[in-house]
Image (tube, rainbow, N blue to C red):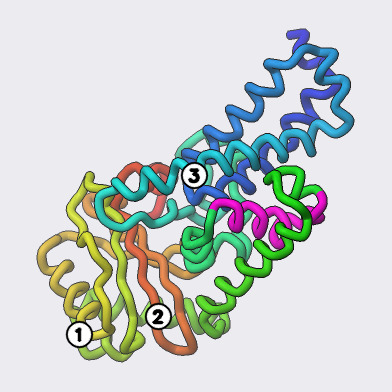
Amino acid sequence: MTIHSDPSLSTLMSERRQLINLAYRLLGSLADAEDVVQETYARWYAMSPRQQEAIESPGAWLMRVASRVCLDLLGSARVRRESYVGEWIPEPLPDRTEWVSGRTADPADRVTLDESINMAFLVVLESMTPAERVVFVLHDVFRYPFAEVAEIVGRTPAACRQLASSARRRIRAAQAPSAPAAQRAGIVRNFKQAWEAKDIDALIGLLDPDATGIVDGGGLVSAMLRPVEGGERLARYAVDLLGRVPGLTLLERRVNGQPGLVAQRDGVTVVVIAFEIAGDRIKHLWGIRNPDKLGPWTTVDLA
């Protein structure tokens, strides 16, 4: 096929992973991120060869267009989420070692699982305005200079500095003191064992007294519509849930690069659970039940 002789094609395609990484962090949805990348490439190929040749850096052009498409989507996402049934939680991602198991996903579609992708971080990003979120992710995560960020979001560099500063304050205010990775994994393992044993006292001991639990069912499956607040209430809710849904198998898995749990029934993933741990206690628990958000998990060999 003549398309392979196009010298810019390999360069363009090599940007795909970076675009997926950017769009997922901005939107919290892999499906939406993939749509953004598709739209970005469609806009490139809609241009004439002469227009394409006039672009000095195709990679920078693709990132700029993807950022703007995300900015537009974030505005409409707020409206969509106002009509969303129950709580909206970002889409959880499996560990990179499990990402392509059982499906022919392009490795370029994999999201790099660093600190800017853990669930607690994504939830804080959700609280930001669209402009704050885009400026912060482009500058603080992807290291774009403010002059370039300003051009992308249509603000002055000074305004972008203020937006980034405001975003950082939100991050700092929400950040829990970090525990070592091995300690976090141990706490999640202890939670799993206490949950399986239906040991309410042990669960209460692992949960912060002010712990919050949120479940996202999206109106497609049963889920609590409001957060469960307080460690004791959350422990009793978890035990009650296990009693009402027999045959659940709990598996320790990494969720967005952090220790988490996956619950399966008859070999099918029905909920993915992410945790935020402060010191030696669980501060937040996010359970994703919406089947539309479990796509990467349903084809993963989790056994």
Along the line of sight, which residue is nearer the eye, 266 or 212?
A: 212
Please tell me which residue lies in front, 264 or 77.
Answer: 77
Q: Residue under label 3, please give it.
A: 75
Q: Is residue 120 left or right of residue 284?
A: right
Q: Residues within 10 Å of mark 2 (few under 14, many from 20)?
A: many
Q: Mark 2 — residue?
A: 283
Q: Secondary structure at mark 2?
A: strand
Picture quarter containing residue 302? bottom left
Majority secondary structure in the magenta region: helix
**N-terminal-most mark, 1 or 3:** 3
| Above or below for 61 versus 75 | above
- The answer to whether one can see residue 197 in this image is yes
| Image location (x, y in percent) of residue 257 | 54, 63
Image quarter of residue 263 = bottom left
> Which three-letter amino acid code belongs to the residue tagged 2?
Lys
Image quadrant where one finds the C terminus: bottom left
Q: How many neighbours does mark 1 have within 10 angstroms: few (below 14), some (14-19), or many (20 or more)?
A: many
- For image coordinates 78% across by 55% down, the residue present is 157
Q: Earlier in the sequence, mark 3 or mark 2?
A: 3
Q: Magenta span covers which residues?
A: 130-147
Per the model, the C-alpha gap separating discs 3 and 2 is 30 Å
Looking at the picture, which amino acid does disc 1 mark? Ile
Q: Is residue 38 above or below residue 258?
A: above
Q: Quick one: 58 or 237, which is closer to the camera?
A: 58
Q: CA distance from mark 1 to mark 2?
A: 17 Å
SS category of the residue bearing label 3: helix
Label 3 Cα crowd, 10 Å radius (few <14 / some 14-19 / many 20+): few
For image coordinates 77% across by 8% down, the residue present is 2
Label number found at residue 200: 1
